């Protein structure tokens, strides 16, 4: 298991498990299907590990502008 996912901090920061999962799935599709370039160095990491690192480094974030959801302040 990826260590960052053991903490609830990343889950709460992104609005819950389902929102975090949706963000991860969207980014994985961009990398694998659409051929997007990683925003962090791969360094032998799997695609999932790469996406989690992008989230941790705040290189990607969900767009809640259309939903009206206000994320909690950390």
Image (spheres, rainbow, N blue to C red):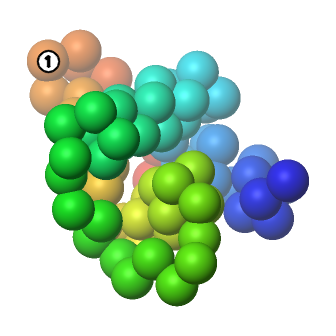
When the figure is inspected, residue 5 is found, relative to residue 69, above or below; the finding is below
Res 71 visible: no
Question: Depth check: 1 or 64 in front?
Answer: 1
Around disc 1, counting alpha carbons within 10 Å, would you say few (fewer than 14), some (14 to 19), or many (20 or more)? few
Q: Return the x and y of residue 3 as percentages of the image width and height.
A: 81, 65
Q: Residue at x 75, y 52 (%)?
A: 5
In the picture provided, is 22 more to the left or to the right than 62? right
* Image position of 2 with respect to 18: above or below: below
Tell me: 6 left or right of 41. Answer: right
Q: Secondary structure at mark 1?
A: loop
* Residue shown at 59% from the left, 60% from the top: 46
Name the residue carrying label 1.
66
Image quarter for residue 39? bottom left
Residue 2 seen in the figure: yes
Q: Is residue 71 above or below residue 65?
A: below
Pick the residue in front: 69 or 1: 1
Q: Residue at x 69, y 55 (%)?
A: 9
Q: Residue 18 placed where, x, y %?
A: 58, 21
Q: Residue furthest top?
A: 67
Question: In the figure, residue 54 lies in which quadrant?
Answer: bottom left
Outermost residue, left side: 66
Q: Is residue 15 found left or right of 64 in the rendered image?
A: right
Residue in the image at 48% along x and 38% along y: 24
Asked whether 7 or 3 is in front, the reply is 3
Count of marks overlaid on the render: 1
* x then y, percent, for residue 4: 72, 62
């Amino acid at each position: 298991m990826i260590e960052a996912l053991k903490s609830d901090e990343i889950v709460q920061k992104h609005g819950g498990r389902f929102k975090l999962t949706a963000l991860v799935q969207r980014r994985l599709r961009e990398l694998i299907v659409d051929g997007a370039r990683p925003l962090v160095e791969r360094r032998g990491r799997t695609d999932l590990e790469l996406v989690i690192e992008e989230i941790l480094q705040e290189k990607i974030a969900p767009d809640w502008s259309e939903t009206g959801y206000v994320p909690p302040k950390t």
